[in-house]
Image (cartoon, helix red, strand yellow):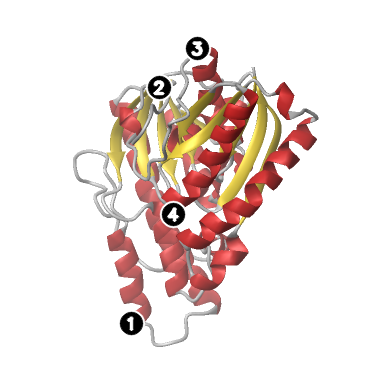
Amino acid sequence: MLILTIESSCDETSAAIVRDGRCVLSNIIASQVDIHACYGGVVPELAARKHLESCPVVIDQALQVAGVTLQDIEGIAVTAGPGLIGALLVGLSAAKALAFALEIPLVGIHHIEGHILAPFLETTANISSGTQQLQFPYLALAVSGGHTHLFRVDGIGAYELIGQTLDDAAGEAFDKVAKMAGLTYPGGALIDKLAQSGDPCYFNFPRPMLHRPGFDFSFSGIKTAVLNQIKKLDQPLEGELLTHLAASFQEAVVDVLSRKAFKAAKEHQLSQIVVAGGVACNSGLRHRFSQLSLSTEIDVFFPEPILCADNAAMLAVAGDYYLTRGLTSPLELNARANWPLAKVTGPLQGQC
């Protein structure tokens, strides 16, 4: 089945053409980073306005790159939530209009569902052996600017929430610490770059909830500890000192994420872990999971970097699965700012 997918949950406008839920023919992403950088974060109203401008453009580009026309499209998958409601409505409105005009089926997909199924879009090399293929069931760590969740994934539409952040998402903590350190938005990638030349043991930041029962996370305490440390400094936060702060903070976050994830996989007797979402691009996180994979014989899968960021192609795995089984959403489909993935058992139906 040849499907068009559309993603507009936050500040990336994206459209992709994917065949049979696996073969990505195009995946166009229009970023808004330059627009929001001066505000230190995403401004919802500005994001929605930019989506209105970009959506037709990225759809046209996706079709051109794939070498197909709208008349070739057999179905449409679109992010229906969670996310910024105004941003979601732009992509959703475009998808519904096209589905109506072309008389083809539509399906609303959960944003995080797209992330944790993204490795199926590629021949993913296993970190520990290089040969294994991802199979259900597996543990998924969804880690981004808006989400930090652990799920047991038993199949498409079958997700069990194992743990989640009780305050800040990991990516949000990265951006906030970057702002404290005087870095520009988005700061997560800058922290990662600085950390590569810093000493991760220079500052001893806490590992909240690491030794508590269960698999929930908390990152506000690490963030507060960084702020208090910056206030105590008797010299400017620059040069080597800045790299040490970045490395120590990143080490604390990576330590918590990795140890919780592997502990959860062992307790639930799962031999594979997927790490997905924007923070999955972090080099420190990838290295730590690689090390633990070798020592525990638990296989770890990361999507390609372009599939870690918000993108439309990642919606195709679930989208194709639902559409080919006749599981569709009506044109009355509405967006959801909040939508627990653990309650997803198929396409989002009707009004929220």
Q: Secondary structure at mark 2?
A: loop
Query: Can you name the residue that lies furthest to the left here?
Result: 213
Quick one: label 1 or label 4, which is nearer the N terminus? Answer: 4
Circle number at residue 232: 1
| Mark 3–mark 1 distance (CA, rounded to whole Å) | 60 Å
Q: Compared with residue 130, is residue 235 higher up or lower down, i.e. above or below?
A: below
The residue that disc 4 covers is 171
The residue that disc 3 covers is 325
The residue that disc 2 covers is 346
Nearer-the-camera pick, 253 or 292: 253
Query: Can you name the residue that lies furthest to the bottom here?
Result: 234
Say if mark 3 contacts mark 2, CB within 8 Å: no
Q: Quadrant of the C terminus?
A: top left
Quick one: label 3 or label 1, which is nearer the N terminus? Answer: 1
Q: Residues within 10 Å of mark 2 (few under 14, many from 20)?
A: many
Residue 285 appears in the rendering: no
Q: Amino acid at mark 1?
A: Lys
Query: Can you name the residue that lies furthest to the front here?
Result: 101
Mark 3 vs mark 1, foreground winner is 3
Quick one: label 3 or label 2, which is nearer the N terminus? Answer: 3
| Mark 1–mark 4 distance (CA, rounded to whole Å) | 25 Å
